[in-house]
C-alpha cells in the first residue's frame, strides 16, 4: 500500500504579522494544501494521513467545506485525519457532525480507536484531542488486534504536555508506521518506521529548514514488513537563521551589503531571521531598522556589545557623572552583572542606544 503523510498545515495561520508578505503566506499555506491533495491523487496513493492541527484554531463551517471539497477531488484516496491540540474538539466543534465525503475518516474520540481497511490489509489507529493539553501517555494504552495487518498509528504530540510517547515502545506493539505530527521544525525520522512530518509549510520564523510531505510504501508478508519512504519539500517558503559577526569598524553600508549578499546567495523563497553579534563602535550610530526593512528579512536580533575604552573615558571625564559612574563600578565585584551594569549605564549617560 502507498500513502502520503502530512501534518500541522495550520490553515488560517498568518505568519510574520506586520510584514508585507504576511497575507500572501496565509494564502500560500491554503494553496500548498490544495496542491498536495491533488498530488496525492496523481501519485495514486491509497491513503492520505493527516496527523493533526490541520487548522490553526477551531475550523469554521465554510473552512471545513473547502477542505471537504478538496478531499472529494481524490475519491480513490482514503483520507484519515484527527484533531490536534490547536483544532482540538469541543462539544460544539463543527468537526463533530460534519458530513464528510465518503473517502474521509475522522477520529472523533479521545481514546484510541481504529479504522480497518481489509481490502488493503491496513488498520489505522488514532484519536483526536479534546483538550489543548494532554499529559497522559494515551498512545501507550492500546494493542494492535491483528499483527498480520499493516498497522499504522496516526499520532500527534510527543512532548511533555502533548501526549508524550516513545516511538520504540509503540513500534514494539506491532505498529508498522507511526505517522506523527506536532513538531513543526523540519521533518525528521524518529526511527526507521516513524516520522515526525513537520508542518507542511513553516508557520513561524523559527520553523527553520525544509518543509513538505512524505510518500511511503509498505508491504507486509506474514509479519515481515518491507517499504520505503521519501520526503518532498514544498518550496514556497523556508526560514533561515543567519548570524553576522560585526567588528568595531563595521559600517552601515558594509553591514547592509553583507546581509544583501547572504540573501542573494540563497533562494528567492527563503526568508531570513538575522542575528548580529560581536562589537560595535557606539559612535558609528548604525541604524539597524534599515535591515528590518530589507526584502526577505523577517526579524533582526541585535546582540552587540559596545566597544568602550573605559579607562580612557575615566581619564577624560574624572569629575563628571560619567567618570564617577565608571570609577564606582570598578569597585564592584568584576562579574557579568557589573560588566552589564557598566555597559548599560554608560550607554544611558552617553545617549547611545545599541540594543533596540
Ligand atoms: Mn500541535
Image (cartoon, grey):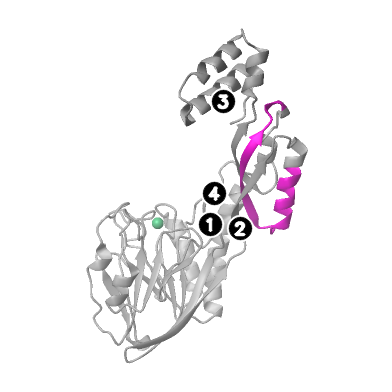
Q: Quadrant of residue 109?
A: bottom left
**How much space separates mark 3 and mark 1, taking CA atoms?**
38 Å
User: x, y (%) of residue 318?
Assistant: 62, 10
Element at badge 2? Answer: loop
**How much space separates mark 2 and mark 4, taking CA atoms?**
11 Å
Is ligand 1 closer than 8 angstroms to the Cβ of mark 2? no
Horizontal side, residue 13 vs residue 153: left or right: right
Horizontal side, residue 278 vs residue 90: left or right: right
Q: Nearer the viewer, residue 319 or 32?
A: 319
Badge 1 vs badge 4, beta-carbon distance below 8 Å: yes
Element at badge 4? Answer: loop
270, above or below 179, in the image: above
Q: Residue at x 31, y 59 (%)?
A: 129
Horizontal side, residue 260 vs residue 155: left or right: right
Pointer 2 residue: 237
Q: Nearer the viewer, residue 318 or 278?
A: 318
Specify the segment rendered in magenta. 256-283
Q: Which mark is drawn over residue 343?
A: 3
Q: Sequence-wise, which precedes: disc 1 or disc 4?
A: 4
**How much space separates mark 4 and mark 3, taking CA atoms?**
35 Å
Q: Which mark is drawn over residue 233?
A: none
Pointer 1 residue: 202
Amino acid at each position: 500500500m502507498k500513502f502520503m503523510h502530512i501534518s500541522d498545515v495550520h490553515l488560517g495561520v498568518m505568519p510574520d504579522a506586520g510584514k508585507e508578505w504576511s497575507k500572501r503566506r496565509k494564502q500560500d499555506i491554503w494553496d500548498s494544501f490544495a496542491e498536495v491533495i491533488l498530488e496525492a491523487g496523481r501519485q495514486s496513493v491509497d491513503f492520505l494521513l493527516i496527523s493533526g492541527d490541520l487548522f490553526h484554531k477551531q475550523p469554521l463551517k465554510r473552512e471545513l467545506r473547502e477542505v471537504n471539497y478538496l478531499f472529494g477531488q481524490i475519491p480513490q484516496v482514503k483520507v484519515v485525519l484527527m484533531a490536534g491540540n490547536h483544532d482540538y474538539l469541543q462539544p460544539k466543534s463543527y468537526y463533530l457532525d460534519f458530513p464528510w465525503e465518503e473517502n474521509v475518516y475522522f477520529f472523533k474520540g479521545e481514546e484510541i480507536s481504529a479504522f480497518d481497511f481489509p481490502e488493503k490489509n491496513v488498520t489505522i489507529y488514532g484519536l483526536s484531542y479534546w483538550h489543548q493539553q494532554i499529559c497522559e501517555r494515551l498512545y501507550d494504552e492500546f494493542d494492535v488486534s491483528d499483527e498480520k495487518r499493516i498497522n499504522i498509528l496516526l499520532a500527534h504530540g510527543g512532548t511533555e504536555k502533548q501526549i508524550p510517547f516513545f516511538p520504540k515502545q509503540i513500534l514494539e506493539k506491532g505498529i508498522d508506521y507511526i505517522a506523527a505530527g506536532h513538531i513543526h521544525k523540519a521533518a525528521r525520522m524518529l526511527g526507521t518506521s516513524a516520522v515526525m512530518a513537520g508542518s507542511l509549510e513553516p508557520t513561524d520564523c523559527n520553523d527553520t529548514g525544509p518543509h513538505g510531505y512524505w510518500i511511503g510504501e509498505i508491504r507486509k508478508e506474514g509479519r515481515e514488513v518491507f517499504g520505503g519512504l521519501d520526503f518532498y519539500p514544498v518550496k514556497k517558503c523556508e526560514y533561515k537563521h543567519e548570524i553576522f559577526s560585526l567588528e568595531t569598524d563595521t559600517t552601515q553600508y558594509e553591514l547592509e551589503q553583507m546581509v544583501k549578499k547572504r540573501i542573494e546567495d540563497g533562494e528567492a523563497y527563503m526568508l531570513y531571521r538575522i542575528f548580529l553579534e560581536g562589537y560595535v563602535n557606539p559612535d558609528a550610530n548604525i541604524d539597524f531598522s534599515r535591515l528590518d526593512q530589507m526584502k526577505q528579512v523577517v526579524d533582526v536580533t541585535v546582540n552587540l556589545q559596545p566597544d568602550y575604552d573605559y579607562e580612557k573615558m575615566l581619564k577624560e571625564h574624572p569629575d563628571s557623572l560619567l567618570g564617577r559612574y565608571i570609577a564606582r563600578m570598578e569597585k564592584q565585584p568584576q562579574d557579568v552583572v557589573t560588566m552589564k551594569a557598566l555597559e548599560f549605564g554608560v550607554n544611558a549617560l552617553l545617549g547611545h542606544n545599541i540594543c533596540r
